[in-house]
Amino acid sequence: MLAPLHLKYILLFILSIRCVFGEEKWYDAEDGSRYLVVDEDNYNWYEALTACATRGLSLVSIQSEEKQNALVDVLKKTGKMFYWIGAVGTYIPNGGLVFRWINDGEEFDYTNWRPSEPNGRGNENCVHLDRHNYRWNDNNCRTNKMALVCEEISRVTQMKKYISSLERFLDEVIVF
Ligand SMILES: [Ca+2]
């Protein structure tokens, strides 16, 4: 049978492994929201999106300064430098790159870009938060490995957004 002292060292060893390989943890933000931070910087944007989806979650969208501030408070407690968020650049028919939130497909209203960003011009279509100053940067979706932040999006919320976008679409194509 293991002595208590040995058990203590085994527990410390297990904890140290968690520190080396990172961890995921739920955080309660001051705005009442909850965010799951996967604090391992080995995901490209697509893998980050999948990591959230497999947990029934979505990469976080930051549509307001209040949400940005809440998220900054959360990230002050985490360990990595770069975190993927749920935004991508999409091309519009008349040219140009427009950034949208994946949760509702809406163009950015509130933004918090790092100075001189976005600068990818189509080569950096995915957005991440930078803990140097908690501002945003567009970066290559596939080649960069980062940590990530997920949030819960309820099925009711998703359905309301779907119905709203469908209504807008029908308003445009149906003439009574
Ligand atoms: Ca950039």
Image (cartoon, helix red, strand yellow):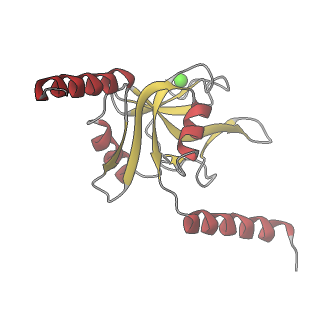
What residue is drawn where x is 42% and y is 52%?
Answer: 64
Task: Residue at 31% x, 25% y: name it.
Answer: 19
Residue 82 vs residue 47: left or right?
left
* Observer able to see residue 132: no
The x, y position of residue 41, in whole percent, is 45, 24
**Horizontal arrangement in the rendering, residue 167 relative to residue 147 (left or right):** right
The C terminus - image quarter = bottom right
Whether residue 101 is situated above or below residue 82 in the rendered picture: below
Of 61 and 89, which appears nearest the observer? 61
Visible residue check, residue 79: yes
| Residue 69 position within the rendered picture, expressed as x and y whole percent measured from the top left | 32, 46
The one of 22 and 95 positioned closer to us in this rendering: 22
Question: Looking at the picture, how far across and down is residue 116, in whole percent?
Answer: 48, 24
- Report x, y in % for residue 107: 60, 49
Asked if residue 41 is positioned above or below residue 61 in the image, the reply reads: above
Residue at left offset 48%, top offset 46% = 60
Q: How many marks?
A: 0
Q: Is residue 142 above or below residue 151?
A: above
13 to 92, vertically: above or below: above
Query: Image quarter for residue 114?
Result: top left
Q: Residue at x 16, y 23 (%)?
A: 6
For the N terminus, the quadrant is top left
Q: Quadrant of residue 75?
A: top left
Q: Is residue 16 left or right of residue 108?
A: left
Query: Residue farthest to the right?
Result: 175
In the image as oriented, which residue stretches furthest toward the front? 1
Q: Camera-side residue: 54 or 7?
A: 7
